[in-house]
Image (tube, rainbow, N blue to C red):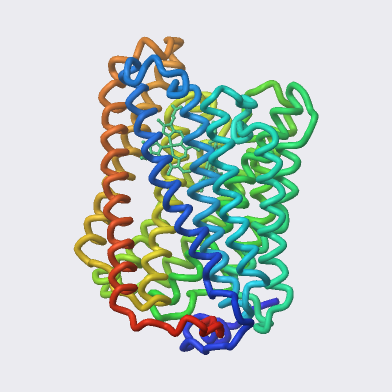
Amino acid sequence: MTVTKESSQKIDSSPSLLTKIKPLAEPDSAARTWLYSGIFWMLVMMLIGIVEAIKLFAPEFLQGVPALAYGRLRPVHINLGVFGFMSMGYVGAAFYMVPRLTQNHIFSERLGSFTAWIWNFNLLSGCMAILMGFSTGKEYEEIPFPFNMLIGLLVIAIAGNLFSTISERREKRIYVSLWYILLAIIPFPIYYTLGNAHNFRGIEDAIINWFYSHNLFGIWLTALGLATIYYIVPKQVHKPLYSHTISFVGFWTLAAFYPWNGGHHVIWGPVPMWVMSASVTASIAMIVPTVATMVNFGGTAWGTWDVLKRDVSYRFSLLAYFCYVGASLWGSILAFMSLNAKLHFTNTTIAHVHLGFIGFGVSGLVAFIYFYLERSLKLKYSQTLAEWHFWLTTIGILGYTISMGINGWLEGTAWEAGMAAQATMLDRYPYHVARAISGIVLLLGQFIFVANVIKTVNYSEKSAPKQPKDSKTQEVAVQ
Ligand code: HEM
Ligand code: HEM
């Protein structure tokens, strides 16, 4: 279904119209539980990332405690990153966006909050199991049975809850954010099950593992992230999206090419040549949706300098946008077979990953939360703290990406010259230290952000007039 410029403007910038809905369901309660949990895991996983980063140049750091060994902390960092911080944060954003884009209340807010709590306890248990040494040993699938199965069931429950809301929508036109949410929730339960419940061995196992893992960040997380910035940016700048036609070109090409990208993680591995060729072609073809997104957001952001100067939330959206475009173009280039031969085993991949996850993932989510505080809860956060947050995050992202980019290039050059990675270890030492410092700067920025959010929400709760306790009628703002 297509959306005209006028209709989207109506969906995007019409004043809130308040719709009475079922009693007992506190509006946005599911969204808040998911969002706040995501932010909590972000702090924890970043802290673990810093410990890992220090261990990579000072191996004696926290030595002697098996649970804190590098090999256990690394998968916990990753799983808390993808399933804790990113999944929870962006599912929270989806729980916020879906009722507004469909003009319908969430099918079940209670189920939404319930799944969030179970998700939290299950993730904690799965990660504790990894720290105790019970890992499957396969990347992005390390969480052992039965915790991995419960994640699968919860993904189905989330998808069902959101899909039921969308299928009963009152707003018949589908804005592009909703397309991206559908792209995330419909196939992901299948990808997840395939990745975690198959019985392949050897090379088939590796191919399926990467098919699933790639779609975990390519479809599930990226689609939810793009849905979020497509939702907030037009509202932040008070104008319609530059082009709906381009957004659909971007959407459909992403949906068509991304699922084929998995094989680019095993380039030059012992996999059939057609798997490599298909995934390299699809990775290069990903330039089309990336450029579509670049042009569309560029066009929307054009001439919004005044908003950029005063609105930190919008600044974070643009940071997310630049990092998304940067990480994606970098990804397409990394997939060239000749370049991949040089860079695959190096820190350039780590730089690419973090430009995507921190630059796009962290910035997009914090942009959304500032937006939520201001537009939905009508609360004004501290501008000074938000400025600090923005600059520390920007410095952290740049520091991480540049230090690991150079580090990886030195590694790749040594590898090409037939030298062992150890031979350049001392030359690369300063870049490892720089990455750890960048991580600390980043985490400091996020602590300032959390303090700002808590202070803002607490202050409003204390100063708000008391609601009568027996008032059960709830309202949801459908924008
Ligand atoms: C304070 C910020 C962070 C620091 C210091 C940090 C540090 C690290 C370190 C040291 C590694 C291991 C690199 C290696 O094996 O050589 C790593 C890997 C990884 N991190 Fe982070 N990280 C941070 C934030 C994040 C965030 C926000 C995410 C979001 C999900 C994330 C996701 C990942 C992933 C997926 C990997 C595995 C990459 C791969 O195997 O290619 N990290 N991180
Ligand atoms: C057009 C878009 C993208 C393309 C074509 C792409 C391509 C690639 C390639 C070729 C690699 C493998 C490098 C190697 O191991 O030799 C890779 C790794 C990775 N990419 Fe991307 N990328 C894209 C966007 C992103 C984004 C936006 C994110 C995060 C939000 C991301 C997350 C990752 C992760 C986590 C890995 C590391 C997996 C691992 O080895 O553990 N990518 N990407």
Q: Which of 67 and 227 is in front in this view?
A: 67
Q: Which of 23 and 152 is in front in this view?
A: 23
Measured along the vertical axis of the image, is residue 351 above or below residue 91? above
Of all residues, the one furthest to the right in this rendering is 199
Residue 171 location, x and y as percent? 65, 83
Q: Which residue lies furthest to the front in this view?
A: 470
| Residue 253 in the image, given as x and y percentages of width and height | 64, 58
Front-lying residue, 277 or 130: 130
Q: Residue 411's quadrant in the figure?
A: top left
Task: Say left or right for 397 vs 160.
Answer: left
Query: Left or right: 49 with respect to 292?
Result: left
Residue at 32% of width from left, 20% of height from top? Answer: 61
The image shows residue 270 at horizontal and vertical percentages of: 69, 21
Within the image, what quadrant is residue 460 found in?
A: bottom left
364 relative to 355, above or below:
below
Q: Which residue occupies the extreme left position in the image?
A: 384
Location of residue 416 with respect to 84 vertically, above or below: above
Tell me, yes or no, if residue 360 can be seen here. no
Instruction: Look at 61% across and 63% down and name the residue there.
Output: 112
Residue drawn at x 36%, y 22% as measured from the top left: 56
**Res. 425 visible in picture:** yes
